[in-house]
Structures are given as C-alpha cells and as structure tokens.
Image: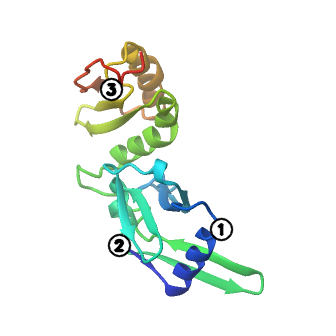
C-alpha cells in the first residue's frame, strides 16, 4: 500500500530518534477524493492512535498510522527522500488521493463528511471525551451518525447534534437533507453530563 524507500526509512528513524519514545508517523489526506486533496505526514504519539479507526503499517523501528477510510486514496503511495544542495526532504506521492470513487462505500460525499467530522467536529467533542463517526449517507441525503465515548448518553447530545453538527454539515454540504443519530445512548460514568 505505502512503499517507503530505504533512504526515507533511515531518515524517518533519524527524525524519530530526537522525539519522545513511542512517537510514530501519521499519514493523512485532507479532502480525499476531491481535486483539492492534499497529503502529508506528521508525528503521532500513542495517545493519538485509535485501534479501531486506524490502520497500522509496521517497519523495523517505527510504525505508520492512517485512517482506514483512506485506504483507497493511499493505494500505490510512495514515501521517498530527496537530497540536494539545500538539504534533505521527505516526499509523499499518493497518486490516488484525488481519485473519485464511484462505489457507495467510498462515495465522494461520505469521504468529505468523514474528513469534516475528523478535522472540524471531533477535536471539539474530544474535549469532553467523545467523538462522532459517520455510519452512512442514504440516497435521500440523510446522514447517519454514531456518537462514542463521553457523547454516548450525554444529556446535551440533542443540542450538540442539532446546533453543533447538523447546522455545520448542512452549511458545508447542501446535498444533505438531515442528520440522524443512530447511537444506542446509555448513560453512565463514560457520559460527559
């Protein structure tokens, strides 16, 4: 899936040797499946890893993580090291990052919504120990979401859904008709309120 040249692996190991133990690499694609897709790499600590949503590729002295929904967009990707008179630079070439998928599972709208939730919504929900994930978008434009962590069973979930998420999603994606919460909310110690 992602090929890393030997020189790039050595360079990454060198960079990670200057970081805290347990630091790895995260590969990301902003706006996957669109003409605006941009790929990148960042440091990733163990607390940033989601064992359910992340895919892991292990190398001898480090690991690379990325969101599983990005698999088709990272197919045939290459990480290499370019060295010239100005120094060394890691490059990530992902020829399928802008690929518009026709299948229902990886529809363009679903990928955009997943990316939006990951970048714009979940960092705020994470402040309360929660997150939200996209289940599906049906043919009528209804978006089905599931809340996790501190959002599951939270007494403010309807407000969060209608004001915090639905308004923003419909503003950015006018093809959406409404949002449905499919979470089986169970209040408990994990709930924020």
Quarter of the image with the C terminus is top left
**Which residue does the image show at 41% across and 58% down from the upper left?**
66
Horizontal side, residue 121 vs residue 42: left or right: left
Q: Is mark 2 on a helix, strand or loop?
A: loop
**How many numbered discs, if any?**
3
Quarter of the image for residue 87 reads bottom right
Could you classify mark 1 by the number of other residues whose Cα lies within 10 Å: few (under 14), some (14-19), or many (20 or more)?
Answer: few
Instruction: Give residue 64's position: percent from left, percent from top.
Output: 44, 65
Q: What element carries label 1?
A: loop
Q: In the image, which is nearer the foreground, mark 2 or mark 1?
A: 1
Q: What element carries label 3?
A: loop
**Residue behind mark 3:** 177
Marks 2 and 1 sit apart, C-alpha to C-alpha, by 27 Å
**Residue behind mark 2:** 1
**Which residue does the image show at 44% across and 71% down from the upper left?**
95
Q: In the image, which is nearer the foreground, mark 3 or mark 1?
A: 1
Instruction: Give residue 44's position: percent from left, percent from top.
Output: 52, 56
Could you classify mark 3 by the number of other residues whose Cα lies within 10 Å: few (under 14), some (14-19), or many (20 or more)?
Answer: few
Quarter of the image with the N terminus is bottom left
* CB under 8 Å between discs 2 and 1: no
**Residue behind mark 1:** 18
Marks 2 and 3 sit apart, C-alpha to C-alpha, by 36 Å
| Above or below 119: residue 56 | below
Q: Which of 93 and 149 is in front in this view?
A: 149
**Which residue does the image show at 45% across and 42% down from the upper left?**
118
């Amino acid at each position: 899936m992602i090929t890393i040249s030997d020189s790039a692996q050595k360079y990454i190991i060198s960079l990670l040797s200057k970081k805290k133990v347990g630091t790895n690499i995260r590969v990301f694609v902003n706006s996957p499946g669109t003409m605006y897709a941009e790929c990148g790499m960042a440091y990733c600590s163990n607390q940033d890893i989601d064992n359910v949503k992340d895919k892991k590729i292990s190398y001898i002295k480090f690991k690379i993580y990325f969101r599983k929904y990005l698999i088709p967009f990272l197919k045939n990707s290459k990480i290499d090291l370019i060295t010239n008179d100005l120094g060394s630079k890691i490059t990530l070439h992902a020829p399928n990052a802008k690929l518009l998928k026709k299948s229902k599972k990886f529809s363009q709208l679903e990928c955009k919504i997943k990316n939006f939730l990951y970048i714009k919504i979940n960092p705020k929900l994470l402040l309360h120990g929660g997150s939200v994930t996209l289940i599906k978008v049906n043919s009528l434009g209804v978006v089905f979401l599931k809340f996790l962590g501190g959002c599951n069973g939270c007494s403010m979930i309807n407000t969060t859904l209608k004001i915090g998420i639905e308004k923003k999603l419909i503003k950015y994606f006018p093809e959406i008709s409404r949002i449905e919460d499919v979470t089986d909310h169970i209040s408990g110690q994990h709930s924020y309120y």
